[in-house]
Image (tube, rainbow, N blue to C red):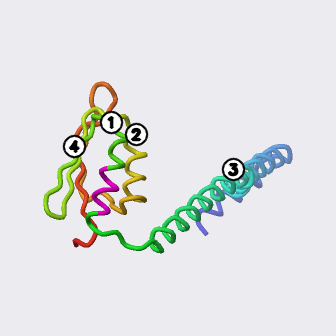
């Protein structure tokens, strides 16, 4: 109450012209606040919604493809350790001389030397689909030529 009284006195002492100008300034501030807090964010959402919708649709399609791939992998009959090793050895040929495989009990260690990134990605997909093996450990470094050096450890099926 004590803060309102001085403001009311100032308002009453102001001329009609000053009161109108102050009212107009207050209206501009209120309209600006309404725009800044209420309208601008809503318009931004409306403007970006179609692009977000397309991105989410693309993500959904990717997820559906991955789901179908996972169902296919689950439906396949399990491989023996020997068949998985042979499939993995066959898939390593796509990496050329830059990859060597060493089998030790149920662990397979693949040593890579200057393997191109796209070839490595394709080989990992082939190892997952054909040999039904996924990496358990990976120690990779990018070399100066842009290729990958290091080791990838996989586990043969039937071993936990």
* Tag nearer the camera, 3 or 2: 2
Using the numbered discs, state the Cα–Cα distance from disc 1 to disc 4 in whole angstroms. Answer: 12 Å
Q: Earlier in the sequence, mark 1 or mark 3?
A: 3
Residue located at (23% from left, 48% from top) = 110
Using the numbered discs, state the Cα–Cα distance from disc 4 to disc 2 in whole angstroms. Answer: 14 Å
Using the numbered discs, state the Cα–Cα distance from disc 1 to disc 3 in whole angstroms. Answer: 42 Å
Q: Which residue is mark 4?
A: 111
Q: Earlier in the sequence, mark 1 or mark 2?
A: 1
Image height check: is 117 above or below 138? above
- At numbered mark 3, what does the secondary structure look like: helix, strand or loop? helix
Check if mark 1's residue and mark 2's residue have beta carbons within 8 Å: yes
* Tag nearer the camera, 1 or 4: 1
- At numbered mark 2, what does the secondary structure look like: helix, strand or loop? helix
Q: Which residue is mark 2?
A: 119
Residue 35 seen from this side: no
Secondary structure mostly seen in magenta is helix
Residue 96 bears which disc, if any?
1
Give the class, few, some or many, for how many residues have Cα within 10 Å of label 4's Cα (few <14, many ≥20).
Answer: some
Observer-nearest residue: 57 or 88?
Answer: 88
- At numbered mark 4, what does the secondary structure look like: helix, strand or loop? strand
Residue 13: x percent and y percent? 76, 50
Q: In the picture provided, is 132 more to the left or to the right than 67?
A: left
Residue located at (36% from left, 59% from top) = 131
Q: Which residue is mark 3?
A: 51
Q: Is residue 84 magenta?
A: yes
Q: Please give the range of residues in magenta.
A: 83-89
């Amino acid at each position: 109450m004590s803060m309102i009284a001085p403001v009311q006195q100032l308002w009453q002492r102001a001329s009609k012209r000053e009161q109108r100008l102050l009212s107009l300034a207050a209206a501009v501030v209120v309209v600006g606040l309404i725009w800044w807090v209420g309208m601008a964010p809503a318009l931004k959402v409306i403007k970006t919604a179609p692009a977000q919708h397309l991105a989410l649709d693309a993500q959904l399609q990717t997820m559906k493809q991955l789901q179908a791939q996972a169902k296919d992998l689950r439906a396949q009959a399990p491989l023996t350790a020997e068949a998985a090793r042979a499939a993995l050895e066959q898939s390593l040929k796509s990496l050329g001389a830059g990859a060597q495989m060493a089998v030790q009990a149920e662990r397979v260690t693949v040593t890579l030397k200057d393997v191109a990134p796209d070839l490595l990605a394709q080989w990992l997909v082939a190892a997952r689909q054909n040999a039904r093996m996924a990496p358990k450990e990976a120690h990779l470094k990018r070399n100066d030529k842009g290729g990958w050096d290091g080791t990838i450890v996989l586990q043969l099926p039937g071993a936990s």
